[in-house]
């Protein structure tokens, strides 16, 4: 019977098992091949919105327990559907951030345990990088495969936890053009849906209600909602930033102490969606014009994230791309939400660009030799706030995390030292005696 290491070394093709548990979806996927010709062998997404619906939103502890309960059988189901065993897996990837701490710990610990037990590399993956590359994965895994977006392309990443404009220069090089200063677009939609007392506090429910509403009627009967940061005079480097907390607050003040009819709630949903979409379109247009003025015009416009499933936003972005003579790309619906397929593709792209001298350097064991090994330190920590850097350098992020731990230990030591000194008597210098008259007279004589 062949050993597991023999099965992996015989095949030079990468096969990645990916785990995604950054928020309220448990997802697993197996992706094989290369970044130019990937094959999605199996993919599962399990949402836990029904568990969190009675609480009116996501409860981190509840979601983490759901991940812990369903992740192991979901991994087994993914392996069974793809007709693989762990012996055929060459890499294991998991979302290490950004996201909810408890959810990240469950997925990352499971992936690290499998990597250590099977003696294969573990690839820590940035959740935002997965979204950034999801338009490429969606195009290449269509039947038949479609042409992926050319580099560089401007990406509008809009989800429940993130909102930013990103210039994707290549699979490992990104430049942040603008980002949200407070609430994410999806978060704003969810909270506005709750304020309007819709059946479920979700952006999908608000979009369905907006189709039956009239934003102009809401402005006439209640109050016109403002477009976020429309007249803000910002610094040149920050003029593409987003903000949605003001829109949520404006709606809360407008309907306070009011009893809205059913039609007024539908009109309010349409008004919120219009204000949010107008803001996103205006900022995207500004970003395209700014990049063109800097002789860095992107070759395409793309959108990703959970809010990318909004059909109104999708249609307006398509019109914006036509206005700038650019092709428009959007992932299919299953790749818009949080999913493990995009994490697997981001890990695959990361493994292919690692220099030769880095290969096998961070593998769990130096005895195994794989054809393509990315940075795979099992000591890589979860990072609930892991910003997508210009080059998304994982080694620097790992070193930075170690420095963070050292700084926390120093702070704790200083606080402990200060508490000890609070209850100890601090020695003081003996008070100096005032000079006498005789002493002063002797000084004057001299």
Image (tube, rainbow, N blue to C red):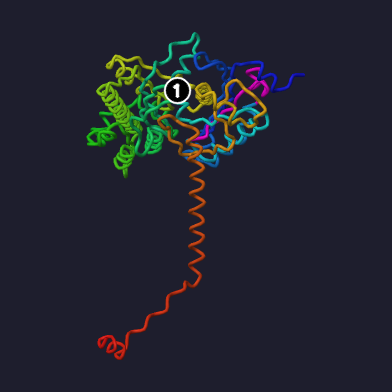
Query: Which quadrant does the N terminus fall into?
Result: top right
Report whether residue 22 is seen.
yes
State whether residue 195 is above or below residue 143: below
* Residue in front for this viewpoint, 47 or 3: 3
Residue located farthest toward the right when viewing the structure as drawn: 1
Q: Decide whether residue 82 is among the magenta residues.
A: yes
Q: Residue at x 48, y 54 (%)?
A: 411
Q: Decide whether residue 341 is among the magenta residues.
A: no
Query: Which quadrant does the C terminus fall into?
Result: bottom left
Packing grade of label 1 (10 A; few <14, some 14-19, many >=20) is: many
The x and y percentages for residue 79 are 64, 22
* Residue in front for this viewpoint, 113 or 29: 113
* Residue in front for this viewpoint, 47 or 260: 47
State whether residue 425 is above or below residue 89: below
Q: Residue at x 45, y 11 (%)?
A: 146
Report whether residue 54 is seen.
no
Does 270 sit left or right of 42 as displayed? left
> Which contiguous range is marked in magenta?
76-97
* Residue in front for this viewpoint, 71 or 376: 376
The x and y percentages for residue 331 are 44, 19
* Dot 1: element: loop
The x and y percentages for residue 52 are 51, 37
């Amino acid at each position: 019977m062949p050993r597991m290491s023999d099965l992996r070394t015989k095949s030079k093709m990468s096969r990645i098992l990916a785990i995604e548990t950054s928020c309220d979806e448990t997802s697993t996927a197996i992706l094989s091949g290369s970044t130019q010709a990937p094959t999605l062998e199996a993919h599962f997404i399990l949402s836990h919105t029904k568990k969190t619906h009675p609480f009116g939103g996501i409860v981190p502890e509840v979601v983490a327990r759901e991940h812990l309960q369903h992740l192991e059988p979901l991994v087994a189901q993914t392996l069974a559907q793809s007709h693989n065993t762990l012996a055929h897996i060459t890499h294991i990837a998991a979302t290490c951030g950004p996201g909810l701490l408890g959810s990240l710990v469950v997925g990352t610990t499971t992936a690290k345990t499998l990597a250590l037990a099977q003696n294969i590399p573990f690839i820590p993956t940035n959740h935002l990088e997965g979204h950034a590359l999801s338009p490429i994965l969606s195009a290449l895994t269509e039947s038949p495969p479609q042409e992926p977006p050319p580099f560089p392309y401007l990406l509008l990443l809009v989800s429940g936890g993130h909102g930013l404009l990103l210039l994707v220069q290549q699979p490992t090089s990104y430049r942040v053009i603008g980002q949200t200063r407070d609430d994410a677009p999806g978060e704003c939609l969810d909270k506005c849906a709750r304020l309007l007392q819709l059946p479920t506090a979700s952006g999908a429910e608000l979009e369905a209600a907006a189709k039956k509403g009239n934003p102009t009627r809401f402005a006439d009967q209640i109050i016109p909602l403002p477009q976020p940061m429309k007249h803000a005079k910002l610094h040149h480097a920050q003029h593409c930033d987003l903000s949605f907390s003001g829109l949520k607050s404006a709606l809360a003040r407008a309907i306070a102490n009011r009893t809205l009819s059913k039609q007024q709630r539908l009109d309010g949903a349409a008004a919120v969606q219009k204000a949010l979409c107008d803001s996103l379109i205006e900022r995207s247009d500004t970003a395209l014009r700014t990049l063109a003025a800097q002789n860095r015009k992107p070759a395409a416009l793309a959108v990703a994230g959970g809010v990318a499933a909004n059909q109104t936003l999708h249609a307006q972005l398509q019109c914006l791309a036509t206005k700038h003579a650019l092709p428009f790309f959007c992932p299919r619906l299953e790749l818009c939400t949080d999913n493990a397929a995009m994490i697997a593709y981001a890990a695959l792209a990361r493994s292919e660009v690692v220099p030769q001298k880095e290969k096998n350097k961070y593998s769990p064991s130096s005895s195994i030799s794989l054809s393509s090994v990315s940075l795979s330190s099992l000591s890589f920590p979860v990072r609930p706030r892991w910003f997508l850097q210009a080059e998304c350098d994982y080694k620097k992020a790992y070193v930075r995390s170690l420095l963070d731990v050292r700084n926390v230990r120093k702070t704790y030591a200083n606080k402990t030292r200060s508490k000890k000194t609070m209850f100890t008597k601090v020695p003081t210098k003996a008070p100096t005696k005032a000079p006498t008259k005789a002493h002063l007279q002797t000084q004057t004589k001299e």
